[in-house]
Image (tube, rainbow, N blue to C red):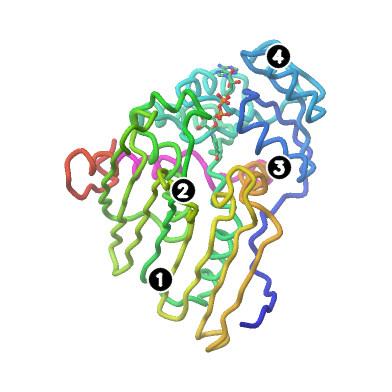
Amino acid sequence: MPNLSLDLDYRPKLGKKQDYGIGIIGAGAIVNVAHLPAYRKAGFHVAGITDLDQNRAAATARQFKVPNVYPSVEALLNDPAVEIVDIAVPPWHQLELVKQVTAAGKHLLCQKPLSNDYTEAVAIVEMGEAAGVKLAVNQQMRWDQVIRASRTLLDRGWLGEPVSATIDVSILTDWRAWPWLLEVEGLDLMYHSIHYFDSFRSLFGQPERVWSSGSTYPGQPAKGETRTLTVFEYTDSFRALISTNHNNQSDDVYATIRVDGTEGYAAGTFGLLYNYPHGRPDTLTFSSRKVYPHISFDHRFEEMWVPDSFIGPMGELMVAIEQDRAPETNGRDNLQTLQLVHAAYRSMAEHRAVSPGEIK
Ligand SMILES: NC(=O)c1ccc[n+]([C@@H]2O[C@H](COP(=O)([O-])OP(=O)(O)OC[C@H]3O[C@@H](n4cnc5c(N)ncnc54)[C@H](O)[C@@H]3O)[C@@H](O)[C@H]2O)c1
């Protein structure tokens, strides 16, 4: 196989102004592992941070040289240097924080899931709209290298008309690393596979119907489902499958994506999940009868899903502010991802295909 390097145009597109002041609420795992390493790499300006746990906020600020530790959310919002508020707390705290942030008239990057309650998610989006601020949701996997590169291949028509797509993930997840997740009723779809749902939406649009089946694993410490199989049916002949298993006890873990079209295919791996949390870069192999018949291209990326893809939603929010338009992962768009997640849960409960439009 030749190892030709093609421009797959997969990196986030940043704007002219990249020094908006970011104020972070929450100094937990994801901020330390992903947000701040990504922002440091991109050169974004973090004005300050706050957390209910002040020691955590102070330790994070020390590690990443964040200039201010605010004693409260109010203090963060009162600082004129904070132009974008980056919320990174468990979802049931998000609505209350969005109320405060929108009242202060600041732009926001909300966490996914926007809320685990659909009505509450709608309320959050409406608050952002009423305040006239830009609200983006941190569905960063759209900027994962293999997802963006697949999008490039699809946009260029190199794969022809998409016919089928599969994400197949079989890993061992120790949920005890996130104690608050042990207690949630809906686990994999709401907190993990939501990334795959949103990524497929970014590649193929909103499906017509969803079929889903979920289950637990004998003796698992978490309450919610840890194995899910979901099928997306579209209006045309295209079909997608997302299979996620968090209970793979063997050494043979895998996390793959494959897209087949009438003119070619793309097959990749999500490197992060092979040796979590250290991981390795994603890989992508593709061929296109339209471009070079009989040749497969192999691409190994330099970046990693985490933290690099976290540059995407924040960078895109900055461009949206600069251009005064909605960000790609805006609240309205995200409601469609949440409708899919809730439709999948309804499908599991009622053993039938569910249209995302049923979720209101
Ligand atoms: N976008 C992604 O890819 C991604 C990945 C992982 C986690 N997440 C989401 O990020 C959020 C945080 O996850 P985590 O693993 O970092 O959790 P965590 O428990 O490690 O950290 C959460 C922090 O928020 C603080 N906090 C809670 N309520 C607060 C409030 N009202 N004001 C100030 N601080 C408050 C807590 O004290 C804690 O330090 C969750 O919603 C999770 O779903 C998103």
**Looking at the image, is mark 2 or mark 1 nearer the viewer?**
2
- Looking at the rendered structure, the kind of residue marked 2 is Ile
Q: Which residues are magenta?
A: 319-343
| Distance from the alpha carbon under mark 2 to that under mark 3 | 25 Å
Q: Which part of the image, by quadrant, shows the N terminus?
A: bottom right
Mark 3 or mark 4: name the one nearer the start of the chain. 3
> Answer yes or no: do the residues labelled 4 and 1 have beta carbons within 8 Å?
no
Relative to 200, is 104 above or below? above
> Answer yes or no: do the residues labelled 1 and 3 have beta carbons within 8 Å?
no
Residue 38 - label: 3
Q: Pointer 2: residues within 10 angstroms few (<14), some, or many (20+)?
A: many
Relative placement, left or right, of 352 versus 206 is left
Q: Nearer the viewer, residue 229 or 141?
A: 229
Q: Residue under circle 1?
A: 162
- Looking at the rendered structure, the kind of residue marked 1 is Pro
Residue 96 - label: none
- Looking at the rendered structure, the kind of residue marked 3 is Ala
| Distance from the alpha carbon under mark 2 to that under mark 1 | 27 Å
Residue 146, magenta (yes or no): no
Q: Secondary structure at mark 2?
A: loop
| Count of marks placed on residues | 4
Q: Pointer 1: residues within 10 angstroms few (<14), some, or many (20+)?
A: many
Residue plotted at (45% across, 41% down): 192
Residue 171 - label: 2
Mark 2 or mark 1: name the one nearer the start of the chain. 1
Q: Position of residue 288 (x, y in %)?
A: 52, 81
What predominant SS class does the magenta segment belong to? helix
- Looking at the rendered structure, the kind of residue marked 4 is Asn
Which of the 4 image quadrants contains residue 182? top left
Residue 55 - label: 4
Residue plotted at (59% across, 45% down): 325
**Looking at the image, is mark 3 or mark 4 nearer the viewer?**
4
